[in-house]
């Protein structure tokens, strides 16, 4: 089992309850973790059908994902879609992949970073467009990122 850490306060809010919780704790905007059915609905909205088929367990601020991915990108998107949810700080991955699939490489976005700046920092062969493509459909069309978000660095 691989364990990945995320910024619990930085993710997307998936339900009104999480937003209300964040407002109550202004200055400490860390919402409760959403329920499994809400998470699966969000995965479907991203077009990540393999996530909707995965077995997902939410316990406190941790999501455990059990399932299969055909590629590194599918596995990484499963992990990122789960971890970039407000209220989640840990993803435990029990996702099987074909033998020889490389381990994921992630980057947590810092204040003021852009995809171009991240591309320069991580690898001379990676461009901002490569990062945008590697993180679709999790990023908006314009490639907007936010501080605390975790993104995938392509191979």
Image: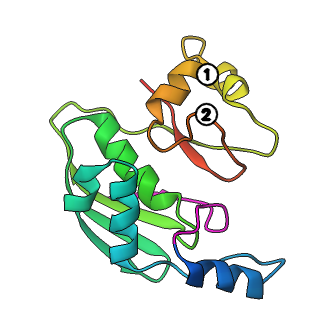
Magenta stretch: includes residue 28: no
For the residues labelled 1 and 2, say whether their Cβ atoms are less than 8 Å apart. yes
Vertical relation: 6 (above or below) 125: below
Is 24 on the left or on the right of 82, as rendered? Answer: right
Which region is colored magenta? 1-14
Residue named by callout 2:
143
- In the image, residue 151 sits, relative to residue 84, either above or below, namely above
Q: How many marks?
A: 2
**Mark 1 or mark 2: which is in front?**
2
Q: Position of residue 76 (x, y in %)?
A: 38, 43
- Where residue 16 sits: x, y (%)? 58, 80
Q: Which residue is mark 1?
A: 128
Could one spot residue 31 in this view of the protein? no
- Quarter occupied by residue 26: bottom right
- What residue is at 42 percent from the left and 63 percent from the top? 91
> Element type at marker 2?
loop
122 displayed left or right of 147? left
Circle 2 crowding by C-alpha within 10 Å: few under 14, some 14–19, many from 20: some
Q: Quadrant of the N terminus?
A: bottom left
Residue at the (73%, 75%) spot, across then down: 29
Does residue 9 appear left or right of residue 123 in this picture? right
Element marked by disc 1: helix
Q: Residue furthest top?
A: 125
Instruction: Give me the residue at 45% from left, 30% from top.
Output: 134
Q: Position of residue 129 (x, y in %)?
A: 56, 20
Up the image or down, 12 lies above or below 21; here it is: above
């Amino acid at each position: 089992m691989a364990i990945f850490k995320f910024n619990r306060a930085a993710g997307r809010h998936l339900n009104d309850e999480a937003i209300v919780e964040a407002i109550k704790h202004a200055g400490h905007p860390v919402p409760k973790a959403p329920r499994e059915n809400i998470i699966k609905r969000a995965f479907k909205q991203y077009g990540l059908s393999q996530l909707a088929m995965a077995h997902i367990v939410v316990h406190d601020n941790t999501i455990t994902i059990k399932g299969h991915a055909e590629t590194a990108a599918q596995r990484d998107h499963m992990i990122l879609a789960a971890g970039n949810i407000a209220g989640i700080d840990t993803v435990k991955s029990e996702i099987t992949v074909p033998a020889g699939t490389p381990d994921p490489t992630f980057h947590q976005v810092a204040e003021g970073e852009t995809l171009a700046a991240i591309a320069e920092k991580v690898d001379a062969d990676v461009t901002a467009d490569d990062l945008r493509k590697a993180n679709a459909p999790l990023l908006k069309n314009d490639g907007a990122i936010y501080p605390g978000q975790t993104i995938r660095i392509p191979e």
